[in-house]
Amino acid sequence: MGKTEKFEFQSEVKQLLDILVYSLYKNKEVFLRELISNAVDALNRVQFELLTNPDVEDKELDLKIDISFVKSQNKLIVEDTGIGMSKEELIENIGTIAHSGAVDFIKKLSEDKTKDQVDLIGKFGVGFYSSFMVANEIHIYTKSFHKGSKGYLWKSKGDSSYTIEESVKKQRGTRIELILKKEEKEFLDTLTIKNVIDNHSKFVPFPLFVENEKIDCVEAIWTQPKSGLKQADYDAFFKFFVNSQEEPEVHLHLSSDAPVQFHSILFVPKTSLELVGLFKIEPGVDLYSKKVLIQKGCTDIMPEYLRFVKGVIDSEDIPLNISRETIQNNIIIDKIKKHVLKKLFDHFAKIKQKDKDKYLRIWKNYNRNFKEGIATDFANREKISHLLLFQSSKKGPDEYVDLKEYIERMDKEQKEIYYVTGLDIESLEKNPALEAFKKKDIEVLYLIDPLDEIVIDHLKEHQGKRFKLVESADIKLEQAKETEKDSQYRKDLENYIGYLKTIYGEKIADVKISQRLVDSPCILVHPNDGPSVQMEKIMKMVNKEYSFSKRAFEINPASALIKEMVRLHKGQPDSPELKELSLQLLDNMMLREGVIDNIDTVVPRLQDIMLKAAKSL
Ligand code: ADP
């Protein structure tokens, strides 16, 4: 026998163990669900190897899971004939947490051990380590499926370290022995274990025995007719499938014979783990052929941006020994993808129409995924565009419109879909560019998510109506009446505009009379449509070299301030004060947009203006 080697757990594993061992997490029984789920994974994987690889250890072994006890030693044993682990895999898989997102989550959790946070553990599955909630010590005997592999014994007391030694193991697979804490002896009971299985694991797709008694499990529920299944069956399958305590928000059961044969159950979870700040979740739709798992998280059917959708797709038309490379170029896979996505988007559209509250929950959880879809999935862009929701000038703070509703409300003369961007609704509503829209009662979409502008950039239009930024230079909503009536004022105004052009120089593309402002004296507008300032700021963050596009400056002839400036310019065109005030007029707008690059000039100038104002009081 070889020697026993001692290893330290990765520090995040230690933290997780610390949380689990001492937490008041109530649902301790989930440890069994996690062990069974790992065993199922291991069996699925060896089943696939058996189909594709001629050199598998213990080829003839039945694929199954056995649960048993040694009551005299407080031992609960879960054994599978799955893929097993080599020594390296033991260290890699059991000693470390590979997923960087999970690592971050655990860090967060160990800083904030409130109940809500600990409950989250249940939502994302705690894995093998949860066994330390009930066990003082754990022994893992394992032997890999590779021909001629040695057996190993892994031991740990759930403190900071574990040991590994060589150990004879007759059969391929993994045997996990929990030496239960005194107060957890209830798990040494057939009835208790059967109950836990019934609650959490009744969909195990391999034979499962408790003390040699075969447990009735529901096999491949997706192949059963819809008519025989109840909501509770779907809920239970979902919980089993994602290792969660929570019911799904949506389930969709599909069966098709033509153009391709397949069965599928798809789910949308109630909680978005990405939204609660966990991490980018893994794709969650698994591909089966005749109930055999072919690929976990098959993105060739359910695209990356729909990674929040969980479930299975099972098709007899897919050859069992298909390799990952051929999945990509397979015609059948392609057909299934088209069909499934169509049904899924139709289903979302139906919920949107029939159950607004439910759809709003889905939207709040997953809107960024839909937006990602608009940018990346050209084939389904149109379908997804009907699922988009926006906040709008015609709606309250927590209400949304879709593009159909916006277009239906449009006036006959209105040709475009107007939008404004900003960091939040409050600041965006103060945008002077909105003044004329408000006055004329024209609806404007409020975009506060930077992704929205990317969406609009990809869509360009909806049902023949182009999207238009309210700050676009060619928007003319207000007639400059006063300037038409009074030709002298008009002339003075033109002169002042000429003056502004000289003092602003290269900073500005143009200075013009505004036909959009109602109250505000001036505004900066975009000579070309978009990108908005918000978007440009993001571009600048990504690329320091990026320079903001030059904008045009519009002034409102009806504003009191502009009238005073025109008067001052007429009387004292060379006045240094006029110049300072006129420069400040532009810099105020730059300040408003947060793109000021000469703040060291602006602040002393403002102070100078204030001093003069104070003295004149
Ligand atoms: P997860 O299952 O979410 O990956 P776990 O902590 O439960 O996390 O398990 C970590 C890894 O250990 C698994 O991904 C798998 O590679 C390995 N593992 C756990 N249990 C078994 C088992 N019964 N047979 C083979 N490998 C296993």
Image (cartoon, rainbow, N blue to C red):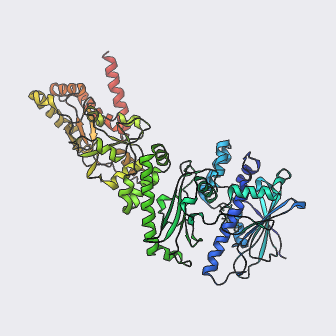
Q: Is residue 615 left or right of residue 493?
A: right
* Residue shown at 47% from the left, 59% from the top: 305
**Residue 240 pos. (x, y %):** 64, 58
Q: Where is residue 278 in the image (x, y as percent from the top left)?
A: 58, 51
Q: Residue furthest left?
A: 487
Q: Nearer the viewer, residue 452 or 253?
A: 253
In this rendered view, identify the residue nearer to me: 269 or 541. Answer: 269
Taking depth in this image into account, of 221 and 137 the one nearest to the observer is 221
Outermost residue to the front: 227
Farthest residue, direction top: 617
Residue at x 10% of width, y 28% of height:
485
Q: How many labels does the image show?
A: 0
- Give residue 300's position: percent from left, percent from top: 48, 68
| Along the line of sight, the residue nearer the viewer: 107 or 177 | 177
Q: Which residue lies furthest to the right in this view?
A: 72
Q: Report the image quarter containing ligand 1.
A: bottom right
Residue 424 sits above or below residue 240 on the image: above
The quarter of the picture where the C terminus appears is top left
Looking at the rendering, which quadrant does residue 410 occupy?
Answer: top left
Q: Look at the picture and state if 8 lies above or below 491.
A: below
Res. 268 in view = yes
Residue 95 in view (yes/no): no
> In the rendered view, would you say 9 is above or below 63?
above
Lateral position of residue 89 relative to residue 548, left or right: right
* Percent of width and height locating residue 383: 37, 57
Q: Residue at x 38, y 60 (%)?
A: 380
Q: In this view, does 190 lie to the left or right of 597?
A: right
Q: In which quarter of the image is the N terminus?
A: bottom right
The quadrant where residue 605 appears? top left
